[in-house]
Image (cartoon, rainbow, N blue to C red):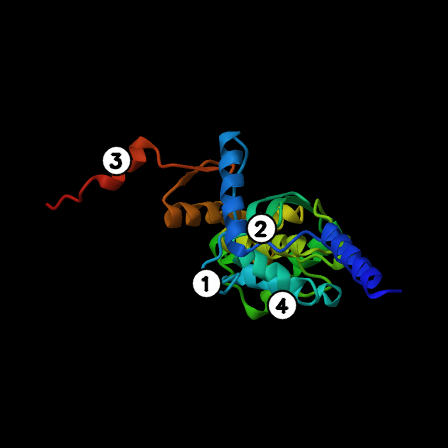
Amino acid sequence: MTRAEFKGETTERILAYDYDYPPYVSVAERRRRAARAVAMRKKKGLAVDPVVIEGRAIARTFWGKAWCDHLGRYSDYANRLPRGRTYVRNGSVLHLGIARARVDALVQGTELYEVVVTIDPLPSPQWKRVVQSCAGQIDSLIELVQGKLSSGVMKVVTEPASGLFPQPRQIRMGCSCPDSAGMCKHIAAVLYGTGARLDCKPELLFVLRGVDHLDLIAGADKGGSPQTRRKGPSRAKIANADLSNVFGIELDSNGNGGPPTRKAAGRARQPSRTK
């Protein structure tokens, strides 16, 4: 092979490599593309709920940290997770929605990619064991969502094999990017973005696993005497009262929240009268 033939073959290999792997796109350019994509979705009336990370920490609360720590236990994902952390910190997760057994997201990479993560609902026997193990140890919904739990309850809900978080075999992932790996960096970003979302909406963990978080509050009644359970108010009502006091909203009998009624707001603004 002559020098010219060798040079030509090398050039062909480089071109083929560039064809299979898109050129690098800077973070600044990805952000510009992301801003355009968000604007277009809003214009079309589509959901836009981006993951916003402030600072280096992806999660700061108990539930968000517990989710991210659980991801770190997946040795099979070790090579992909760091790239996912970088993507989510850069604001590349433009939309992330959590529903029962499913996470849908849009991630800005070289292009805008669609990510779908499906997670098996928590098996009923496993959920019952969690509820029974936590019985009598969680006094209100506020304690639950804020992660103000005893060490015993924390151990139960975060136990890798029997707690609330999914195992790798219970997770199926898909991304529209050309990466053929089981977990691409876009999927990893979505998994970490889920942890960040649990920071502000921890109740979504229970939605994702298909269980009712109020079972943990109701389970607390099992720790009292029959007379206490029969005469005392339900834990759900106590939880609703706590939410009303903390967030300034009124809840109906089904626990649905909304803005304060005009009558209630008027009472709140009325100055106290001195005799």
Q: Position of residue 47 (x, y in %)?
A: 54, 36
Callout 3–callout 4 Cβ contact below 8 Å: no
Q: Residue at x 66, y 66 (%)?
A: 72
Q: Residue at x 50, y 64 (%)?
A: 57
Check disc 1 and give the amino acid type: Gly
Binning the other alpha carbons within 10 Å of mark 1 as few (below 14), some (14 to 19) or many (20 upward) gives few
Q: Which residue is mark 3?
A: 266
Binning the other alpha carbons within 10 Å of mark 4 as few (below 14), some (14 to 19) or many (20 upward) gives few
Q: Which residue is mark 4?
A: 155
Whether residue 189 can be seen here: yes
Callout 1: SS: loop
Q: Position of residue 105 (x, y in %)?
A: 61, 45
Camera-nearest label, 3 or 2: 3
Q: Which residue is mark 2?
A: 218
Rendered view: 170 above or below 68: above
Check disc 2 and give the amino acid type: Ala
Check disc 3 and give the amino acid type: Gly
Q: How many marks?
A: 4
3 or 2: tag closer to the N-terminus: 2
Q: Residue furthest left?
A: 275
3 or 4: tag closer to the N-terminus: 4
